[in-house]
Image (cartoon, helix red, strand yellow):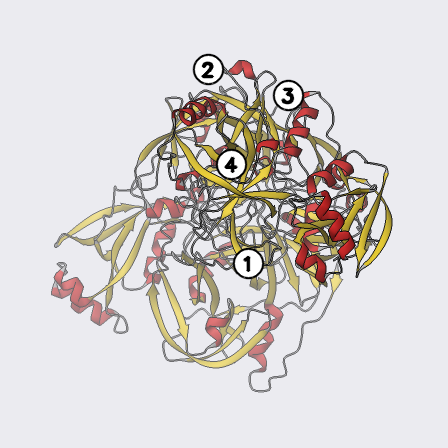
Amino acid sequence: MDQKNGDARSKRKQPPTSPSSDRPMKQIRALEQDSDYTNGNSPVHTKYHDGNGNGELDIEMEEDPRLSRVTTATADTAEWQATIEKVVKNVVSIHFCQTCSFDTDSALSSEATGFVVDAEKGYILTNRHVVGAGPFWGYCIFDNHEECDVWPVYRDPVHDFGILKFDPKAIKYMPLAALELRPDLARVGAEIRVVGNDAGEKLSILSGVISRLDRNAPEYGEGYSDFNTNYIQAAAAASGGSSGSPVINIDGYAVALQAGGRADGAATDFFLPLDRPLRALQCVQRDEPVPRGTIQTQWILKPFDECRRLGLTSDSEAALREAFPKETGMLVAEVVLPNGPGDKKLEEGDLLIKVNGELLTQFIRLDEILDSSVGKKVQLLIQRGGENMDLELDVGDLHAITPDRFVSVAGAAFHDLSYQQARLYAISTKGNGVFVCESAGSFRFEGSYSGWLIQSVDNKETPDLDTFVEVMKGIPDRARVVVGYKHLRDLHTLNTSIITIDRHWSAKMRLAMRNDATGLWDFTDIADALPPVPPVPRRANFIKMDNAKYPKAVDIVRSFVRITATMPVKLDGFPRGRKTGHGLVLDADKGLVIISRATVPYDLCDISLTFANSIIVDGKVVFMHPIQNYAIISYDPSLVNAPVQSAKLSTTPIKQGEETIFFGFNQNYRPVVAKTVVTDITTVAIPASASTPRYRAINLDAVTVDTNLASQCGSGVLIAEDGTVQALWLTYLGERHSHSGKDMEYHLGLLTPMVLPVFNQILGGVMPKLRFLNVEMHTVQMSQARIMGVEEEWIERVEKEDPERHQLFMIRKIDSGHNDGLQESDIILTLNDKLVTRVSDLDIQYDNESLDAVIVRKREQIRIKIPTVPTEDLETDRVVMFCGAMLHRPHHAVRQQISKVHSDVYISGRMRGSPSYAYGLAPTNFITHVNGRSTPDLDTFLEETHKIPDNTYFRLKVMTFDNVPWVATMKKNEHYFPTLELLKDASEPLGWKKIIHEVDGKGKGMMGEEVLEGRDAVDVEGGEGEA
């Protein structure tokens, strides 16, 4: 969203993450970019139209306390000083995590402020945008730095306040007191102080004077916004950490609640009046429900001059002014929701004169009447175009149209559309489809992570959550169904997609109910998965490309298959949760396909293959090459009744300058073809991603061609006119751009002779067990080699034996932990007495446990024996999810880029709203100790963490990627984040086994055995990279 008049002032503390230019959401921090390991502040900024003709203003919620200016009132009197000294003991710093996305809130970890309003029963008042729409887990810190757990017991459906509960007995070293709420003392001209607590570390005391009592509630854009209330305005210049701060007068009474402020640097802040918070508190104190009535209409305060233009008669104005001599405006209908109580009766622009025969100009009195009339009728007198109209409206229950439950299925989460969302877009709360609060798994749609409404599934309408659940219960695992959906920002367009229902990684259908007594989500399994329908053979024909010039070449279309890989958990720093590309069928009889590892990065995934744009079958990973960027996929050929053709691979390498035919698939997956020339075949180095280590190809010769199609196509081949494939055209995943955060991809050719040795083994039924030199090399020219000590006879030998390439290889980087052979800057002359000038000369490494090498080291020529290492251990085969952190052995890319592996407990990612996120565990960190005990591997880590009771603090010694040690303290949360392990196991149907190590009492933690539920790219910070 555009930022006007300077940068926003963000007031809620952010977790360690970098800012984002994505759409701001005022009740949370702005969505993070991918650089999860860095520190940064995310401004929450939006435009606000105040409804009073003041145009658009920059508004912010009270957010990031790290930006706080510690300000005290200047020249405070002794009376003010005494008041503040008393008040600060009641102010607390709130640290909290919303564990999952719900309604207007995303999963997040953050901080804010609150103050004690009942010291005996333990109630704290703060903002609704802090409490959130659903439960959170968190704690508060008092002025003397005592800490206790807090949980929400009430959040208002509309107004920006909520109530938290804590155990007063937990505070032992400070007498507790409460601030009395006195909304009647908020008056224009009153001197006030805003007392905020910045993360329990420093106090922010800001002075101001109330200037207005009748400002409309600020509109914060998408997501949560307060409405149907007036706000108090003051020039206090409140800054960081002041969300939920008390606004006090000189007598120490709370007269308002800090909520928002201008984001353009102006010293203007907005406070919520305390009339409705006081009523709600009294209900909660009496253990009574808090009735909230609604006619599903948004009202706005407009001055009398505007109301006259809307048709306000002079008689009515006179009556209102006489009854309320200090008032200068009245309530006007702004949004009337379809199918609500006011629909077809009230209209936008109607002027509210009386309610139940009582003249009325203020929100507070309207709230009082509606809240006391739930389930009853109210009489309204309105003016429309100068004419009086009497209306009778039913008063609905506001809580009934505010979701308190969601259902998770197929990796995503859903609930009915809330009044908050419906009001923002002026649509009905009923019949518009099911709201996707967690757009992940099978229901991860392109374009946006939030705001989707499911209209139908499997050609069955889904107008509400109950209907949606019944529809989903009848859909078997792995079924492909048609889904119709709209976005709240574009309700004119019905989108249609075909999705695959995942009920294997996310097997259970689970209901989460908000429990305001315990402050938790209560989880219940409501349906098991139906088994998948056995696949049946299908027939199809490939398209025909009428190209008389190269008929055999274009017939390669029958050897291509579209492959989609869906990753339920993001590992190894791979930045995407779903990737699609084209693979080449190498053997149609045995069902073997080769595909880039930029499409299939690891084997913890679902793979679907589409033949002839018609037949869809499942596949599985057979082999992944550790350094050459390709994987071999298998499928059941008996299911494909189509003229699939095995590609014929060339056994001799194509040469620079030779003509060839480029056949590829563009971004729209359309085949394209062009005659071209090989411009170069050279050793390339795919740049390493310094901030996000992930798989990349190394030590490879890449082919480039002279056609613009090459940069547009991520999949294809270079093919001779007789139909022989000379090179594979693959996508290579590269570095993450440091400024844009985008992941770079390179499109290059891989010579087919490089693939044949491995493929022939697989074809013969032998699984390749490759070995390799754990080094990254780059080429040096003869001029450089001579300076580095290579003798002239070797230079002459290179020129003689390889007249096309006058080059040698120098060691650029050695994998950590392997310094017993080659060293960095060594130049390789021969391996097993064979001169090495090309990457293909390195193939000797695959089948030998050691190699005899002649090298030049520090200008000396020496002969050494170089050990090779097995490649089976390079792929991740075990994942531990602990407190929301994804842990596994450092994958190969990490070992390539780091000089020392500090531990085999490597943080690859973390879940938003989890302890690992809240306490700052960053991807690319290593955990070396738990509570002072060394944890060199996952076994010892699990052994030590199993000793830690639930909801208990423990210590972690952590080492950053840059070798900086630090200590983290964390609190365990087994209800939402039990410890789960994924083990590669060929005997399991999915190839992986799930093990639950712990879970709260009844085994009904948020994730439980369904740890993957709703934990796709939205929640999991792609550790080292996120889509």
* For the residues bearing labels 4 and 1, Cβ distance under 8 angstroms: no
Q: What residue type is labelled 4?
A: Ala
What kind of element bears circle 2? loop
What kind of element bears circle 4? loop
Query: Which residue is located at x 57 percent, y 64 percent?
Result: 582
Residue 889 location, quadrant: top left
Question: In the picture shown, does residue 870 fall above or below 487?
Answer: above
Disc 4 to disc 2, how far (Cα)? Answer: 31 Å
Tell me if mark 3 has few (under 14), some (14-19) or many (20+) residues whose alpha carbon lies within 10 angstroms of its own. Answer: few
Where in the figure is residue 959, as x and y percent of width and height?
Answer: 34, 35
Depth-wise, is mark 4 or mark 1 nearer the camera? 4
Disc 2 to disc 1, how far (Cα)? Answer: 46 Å
Where in the figure is residue 353, as x and y percent of width and height?
Answer: 78, 49
* Label 2 vs 1, first from the N-terminus: 1
* For the residues bearing labels 2 and 1, Cβ distance under 8 angstroms: no
Q: Report whether residue 684 is seen.
A: yes
Kindly identify which residue carries mark 2.
174
On residue 56, the disc is 1
* Label 4 vs 2, first from the N-terminus: 2
On residue 1001, the disc is 3
* Label 3 vs 4, first from the N-terminus: 4
Kindly identify which residue carries mark 4.
190
Left or right: 355 as drawn, with respect to 67: right
Question: In the picture shown, does residue 680 fall above or below 521?
Answer: below
* Label 2 vs 3, first from the N-terminus: 2
What kind of element bears circle 3? loop
